[in-house]
Image: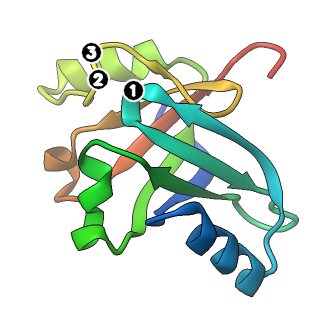
Amino acid sequence: MIYKDAPLHHVGVVQPDEEQALAVMETLGLREAYRGYVPQFQALCIFTHAPHGSPVEFVIPDGGPLVKFNKGAGGLHHLAYEVPDLLAVSADFERQGLRMLEPEPVKGAGPFLCNFLTPAATRGIIIEYIQPLPNG
């Protein structure tokens, strides 16, 4: 169960648009580290620097179900944990009768692969698992 001791990678927050995400970043004194677009989730993702603690990822959907997250207002979306082997995590959950949301890992907005444990397994808490890519 390699996911049990996994360190927190980031906290994901959905924002309705980039302007609002940048305003929250300014309010909190956060600086952008990098950004990327994930076609699978129809979302621009802006990751922040984290001088202390975990980075915050701002997720800005331009389509799909995330547009309606929290009635379109956005808000705290997920906790992401870093694991060395995402396929092993998926297989372990499958042995427990649990499943990931995607059939295969998805290339994330940064140098990593990702997938989400179905929220039914965690009483509605959205948990993402991140596997860093080599040289990432």
Q: Amino acid at mark 2?
A: Glu
Drawn side of residue 1 relative to residue 7, left or right: left
Q: Amino acid at mark 1?
A: Gln
Drawn side of residue 119 relative to residue 6, left or right: left
User: Looking at the rendered structure, which numbered label has been put on residue 92?
Assistant: none
| Residue that numbered label 3 is attached to | 103
Q: Nearer the viewer, residue 64 or 108?
A: 64
Q: How is the image coloured?
A: rainbow
The answer to whether residue 19 is above or below residue 130 is below
Q: What residue appears at the point 65 percent right and 36 percent down from the top-left corner?
A: 36
User: Looking at the rendered structure, which numbered label has been put on residue 40?
Assistant: 1
Q: What residue appears at the point 47 percent right and 35 percent down from the top-left corner?
A: 129
The answer to whether residue 12 is above or below residue 98 is below
Q: Quadrant of the N terminus?
A: top left
Q: Nearer the viewer, residue 90 or 62?
A: 62
Sequence-wise first label, 1 or 2: 1
Discs 1, 2 touching: Cβ within 8 Å: yes
Q: Amino acid at mark 3?
A: Pro
| Residue that numbered label 2 is attached to | 102
Q: Say which element carries label 3.
A: loop
Discs 3, 2 touching: Cβ within 8 Å: yes
Q: Quadrant of the C terminus?
A: top right
Q: Residues within 10 Å of mark 2 (few under 14, many from 20)?
A: some
Residue 13 position within the rendered picture, expressed as x and y whole percent measured from the top left: 49, 63
Drawn side of residue 68 relative to residue 120, left or right: right
Calculate the distance from the C-alpha at mark 1 to the C-alpha at mark 3: 12 Å
Q: Say which element carries label 1.
A: helix
Discs 1, 3 touching: Cβ within 8 Å: no
Q: Nearer the viewer, residue 9 or 17?
A: 17
Q: What residue appears at the point 69 percent right and 70 percent down from the top-left corner?
A: 22
Asked whether residue 31 is in view, the answer is yes
